[in-house]
Amino acid sequence: MLVLAQLTALALLLPYCLASPVASSSASLPGSTSRVAGLNAVAKASGKLYFGTATNANEFQDDPVYGAIINDTRQFGQISPANAMKWEFTEPNPGNFTFEDGDIIRDLARNNGQLLRGHNCVWYMQLPDWIANGTFTYHEMINIVENHCGTLVGHYKGEMYSWDVINESLNDDGSFRENVFFNATGPDYIPAALRAARAADPHAKLYINDYGIEGRGNKTTAIQNLVRKLKSEGVPIDGIGIQSHLTVGQLPTDLAENFQDFGRLGAEIGIEFAITEMDMRILGNVTAEVLEQQKAAYETVVDACHAVPECVGVTVWDFTDKYGWITDGHADIWDDDLQKKPAYDGVVLGF
Ligand code: 9MR
């Protein structure tokens, strides 16, 4: 719910309204009817730091309509590289770092004054062969992780609001995922990566990011316990990323309560959290009715973040069905034709 000051701020944004409020996604399906200036503007007016999106360089370089939207800071105040800063691109061979692709994303955000979330230092996917198929001793792997995170985070020193230092390190039952890092070091690669990231950029907020933690459950408890333990041991950790790849009709029923739990934990131990990769998959046919359900689902999730001060912002994992990683689920807030869907209005309502 909006308080008076926030309503006043929203009213100030109205001069930016679109002349035509209705953007229809196709001849037969409804579009957005929102009259607000943009999602980042609304997020900030409601007390959040940003509304953001993931992107890949070809999308804004080759598609001027997409480019105009992502460059509009009333819509997006934060950018995440969907792929460009992952290990396979940034250290394709041992010790051989390449930042060209990442720098293109950095330049987009820098030119627009948008915040950046780095993604990511350590993940078991999108690894180059030399690490995915290598065999390493404990000390070799700790050195590899420290060198990768230190060099990657150091390259973008001073430019990142936050970094997903650790990505998807837990199984659904809350146990540690057995990946190439864990197999060599047990869980010790996690503090090693976080310490190297802190040393490389003391001002970036360091996150652990995962999916399947949007509702209460074993994995959610495990990530909360992990972060609590790291914090108590003096390991640098500033945030938890709740990815929020969700499905219409299948939202966790305790999602709002769970976000309150994260908020209480954050207030207690001094960490923040964020929605880092939101999208809302549709199963089956896209009808006017299901687009309304998708709108309501976006509203529910954004409202859960809005309700908790420790939730600092919301990022969608690309904003249009044209480029989203879910190719058949119409999961995003702009459609294939780069027209706003009812889901866009759901985000506005959530803030
Ligand atoms: O959006 C990314 C997509 O282009 C890649 O093909 C995919 C490879 O696994 O990774 C996607 O991004 C993922 C993110 O890095 C971590 N969380 C899940 C995201 C969606 O798969």
Image: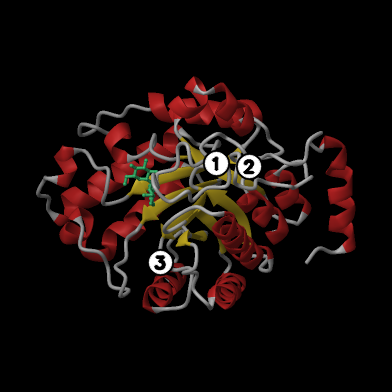
Callout 3 secondary element: loop
Q: CA gap, disc 2 to disc 1?
A: 6 Å
The crowding category of the residue bearing disc 2, from other C-alpha atoms within 10 Å (few below 14, some 14 to 19, many at least 20), is: many
Name the mark nearer the viewer: 3 or 1: 1
Query: Which residue occupies 56% across, 29% down?
Result: 66
**At 31% across and 46% down in the image, what residue appears?**
146
Is any part of residue 331 visible from this angle? Answer: yes
Query: What residue does disc 1 label?
Result: 335
Q: Do the numbered discs 2 and 1 sit on residues whose CB atoms are within 8 Å?
A: yes
Q: Determine the CA span between mark 2 and mark 3.
A: 27 Å
> Can you see residue 116?
no
Q: Residue furthest left?
A: 135
Q: Is residue 101 left or right of residue 139?
A: right
* Label 3: how many Cα within 10 Å (few below 14, some 14–19, many 20+): many
Q: Residue at x 27, y 68 (%)?
A: 176
Q: Which mark is residue 340?
A: 2
